Amino acid sequence: MNTLTRLEDTIAQRLSADPDSSYVARLNAAGAPKMAQKLGEEATETVIAAVAGSKADLISESADLLFHLLVLLGAKGVALNEVMAELDRREGTSGLDEKANRSAQ
């Protein structure tokens, strides 16, 4: 089991915990819009770290981004293995071709 899978399991356990004792439960209680907002904030902080921060800043912000993505996915009932399967499906396809295929749909 890898780090992201273990984190996904921990998040799943905490989604229904007491919001007063769990950050994940607090986010879940606030709903998907709040979780999406927090994910957006973390994405912005990751971009800023990539452009103007140190390597350590980028690593830290990237960890926050992945964490908040897993929280949102878990709350929406999307398993990490489903996202990984989509990445596997795209493997070997040019990014330009994949983007064109999405636009055509």
Image: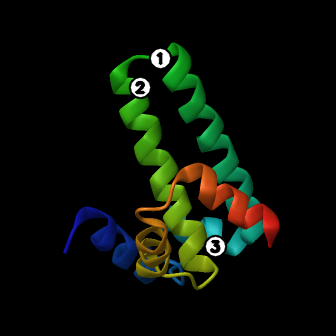
Residue at 50% from the left image edge and 80% from the top image edge: 17
Which residue position is annotated with label 1?
Answer: 53
Could you tell me which quadrant the C terminus lies in? bottom right
Disc 1 residue crowd, few under 14, some 14–19, many 20+, Cα 10 Å: some
Residue at 22% from the left image edge and 68% from the top image edge: 2
Residue 72, given in percent of the width and then of the height, sits at 60, 68
Disc 3 residue crowd, few under 14, some 14–19, many 20+, Cα 10 Å: many
| Identity, as a three-letter code, of the amino acid under mark 2 | Asp
Question: On screen, 1 above or below 40?
Answer: below
Viewer can see residue 19: no
Disc 2 residue crowd, few under 14, some 14–19, many 20+, Cα 10 Å: some
Q: Quadrant of residue 6?
A: bottom left
Outermost residue toward the left in this view: 1
Q: Quadrant of residue 97?
A: bottom right
Q: State the residue in front, 36 or 10.
A: 36
Which residue position is annotated with label 3?
Answer: 28
Question: On screen, 16 above or below 1?
Answer: below
Are circles 2 and 1 on residues that touch, CB within 8 Å? yes
Which residue position is annotated with label 2?
Answer: 57
Could you tell me which quadrant the N terminus lies in? bottom left
